[in-house]
Amino acid sequence: MSLKALEINEVLTDSPSFKQKLADHKAELDQTNKYIKSLHEACKNVFDTAKDLSDKQLHLAKILEDFNLKFAGTQSGDDKVLQESFQNFAQLLKQVENERDLFLKSVEDCILNQFESFRKKELGNVRKESKNYEASCKKFSNVLNNYSKNKYSTDSSLREFDEMFADEQRKWNDQAANYILKVLEVEEKRKMELFKIMQTYINVWFNFYHVGFEKKKDNMNDINKFQLKIQHCEMNFQQFQEDANKLKEVTFLSRKKKGIENGLSDVQLHDDKIPVSCEGTLFLSQKKNLKNLKTMAINISSSPVCKTFCEYRDSRLTVKQENGTENTYLVSQGMRKMLGDQGTDRRYCFEVNAQKQDKSPVTLTFIAITEGDLKTWLNTINKHPVDSEVKVVKRLPNFDDVGTKFVEKCIEIIEKSAATEQGIYRLPGVATKVQKLVSDCIDKRKPLSILEGTEIKVIASALKHYFRELPEPLLTFELYESFLSAAKMESKLLMISDIHRAIYQLPDANFDILKILVKHLTTIAAHSITNKMTAANLAVVWAPSLLRPRVQTIEGIIETKFVTATLEVLINNYEVIFAGPLKDGAAPPPPLEPDLNGAKRKSPGRSNEDLGPKDVMSTSYPTNSPGLFMSYLSSSVQMISFFLSLDDETS
């Protein structure tokens, strides 16, 4: 509801409607005073909360600075980047909070003081004028009452009283007019002043937010890099879950099958073919050495036992007790099982003849948990092979014409119709359809034309499945450690160099197939803007299919990230690596890194012979080894020859 305007001429009449309008305006200014108090208090609370938030953000930054994660296995480049990201986040928070601190110091007092200044000065003056007006009204009312009551007999006295009354009325009118003008002035001024204060408040906050936005822009490259690394970690984690669950199933399935004949065994063997070492839980009988066999047997049955963890390696038996005691014995004469007719009622009891560290003989009596454990320990220490069912896993044959043609046909179909399909190779096909397709094409030798009408996801998954089920991975067991060692290099240049050399140690058939496959993955990565499959993403989904250790373990699964790094290097540097073997002592070209949107930088695609003088001079070669230095020297000679040829042409 709007207020009615106050008119100056209404002061002369002093009507009840004028008095009501004046009272309404006065009440509105009182409400304005309360409103400004609320604004002042709210803004102060915001500033106090902002200071508290800043303190908490700085505390968070301190925790991030000190935050340190320990990783299983060797740290990869992604692991190091993500570890460093915590420190980078801390620095970013500190920068933003420093800006917040400057902002609070510069505007807090200014804004709060403006609220108080307007409330006390402007509204205070209105209240002062209101009191003066009320006093003037009271005084004029008394004069008016006296004027109406008194009677004067002479004309002179009447004129004097009329003049006095007119003077008082003029003063009252002036006071009333001043009050009305002050009320109207403050009502108009409050809109301007309050708007200016709040505009300042909003602007400074937006300026602070803009500073935060600018900080984000300044660190956008790092933020995008972290985002890519997080995506890689998520994909690695999904692969880790899949591989770890498969390893669990295989481990317990093998254990269950062994238990059918031997009794369930908890002993861990370290060589499946010739068990020369094992470890597991045994109970040690704490009997005294007695010469009488019958007395000894009774002693075994009644003597206490203690739980131990035993390790046998290289004819040495290490016994670790729960109280921390650890003893190592040299097994001298093997071991024998103690049967029930030897006077013991303990199940799965056996003796080990050994020597202490001082070479004194000792006989240790152990009790196994299961019959399977007993057989394992007996056969291991006595150097007999363990009787266990060997699981035969059906694997696809090595490379042949059928396999090569299958790979080429799958690649042809995918590149022809699905190179830009989002999530190609990441989104799996139906497992049963994938297995049937591989079986039909490889085992049953059906014509490859059946691939034509098959769903692209099934074809892509079948291609990965084919490589994963090979008896030996494409990059071979023999070169597994070479590729991992190369991927763990700190220097990108040395990493590419070592991977380059290892690739040319592959058998010819493996090399040819690998070249076809990596060229295909390079083509897919070139469309990463549409298919969202960068070289790094392709490496994550393909790496487990191309390289694995002979025996799969959790440590091997964790090390898959280095296999991923190897494949990413191959994809990003396909033209350079597959152009030919790296000469001894030659420096590889600078690594080609993907940019932040996933597209690969333009490959030079040419050797130093094709470069002009400016290009050769700008090429960076490390000189920390004689071979690399000779490569640099050779490039310099090429540059000089280039200039000489120019001189010859000019002349």
Image: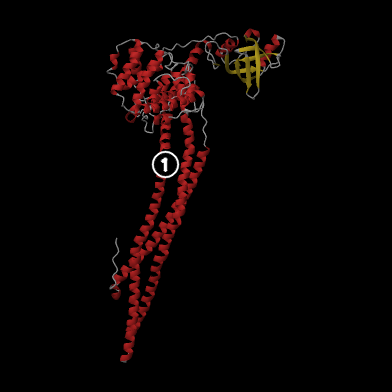
Most distant residue in the bottom direction: 154
| Picture colour scheme | secondary structure
Seen from the viewer's position, the closer of residues 373 and 127 is 127
**Quadrant that contains the C terminus:** top left
> Can see residue 86?
yes
Q: Is residue 19 above or below residue 106?
A: below
Q: Is residue 222 above or below residue 443?
A: below
Is 165 on the left or on the right of 629, as rendered?
left
Seen from the viewer's position, the closer of residues 608 and 354 is 608
> Can see residue 246?
no
Seen from the viewer's position, the closer of residues 129 and 494 is 494
**Secondary structure beneath label 1:** helix
Seen from the viewer's position, the closer of residues 291 and 5 is 5
Q: Is residue 512 above or below residue 109?
A: above
Image mark count = 1
Say which quarter of the image contains residue 175: bottom left
In percent of width and height, residue 182 lies at: 35, 69
**Quadrant that contains the N terminus:** bottom left
In percent of width and height, residue 49 lies at: 46, 50
Label 1 Cα crowd, 10 Å radius (few <14 / some 14-19 / many 20+): few
Residue drawn 39% across the image and 18% down it:
514
Most distant residue in the front direction: 651
Residue drawn 41% across the image and 31% down it:
231
Is 134 on the left or on the right of 95, as rendered?
left
Say which quarter of the image contains residue 183: bottom left
In percent of width and height, residue 621 lies at: 46, 28
Provide the residue designation for mark 1: 218
Which amino acid type is shown beneath numbered disc 1? Asp
Most distant residue in the right direction: 291
In percent of width and height, residue 321 lies at: 63, 22
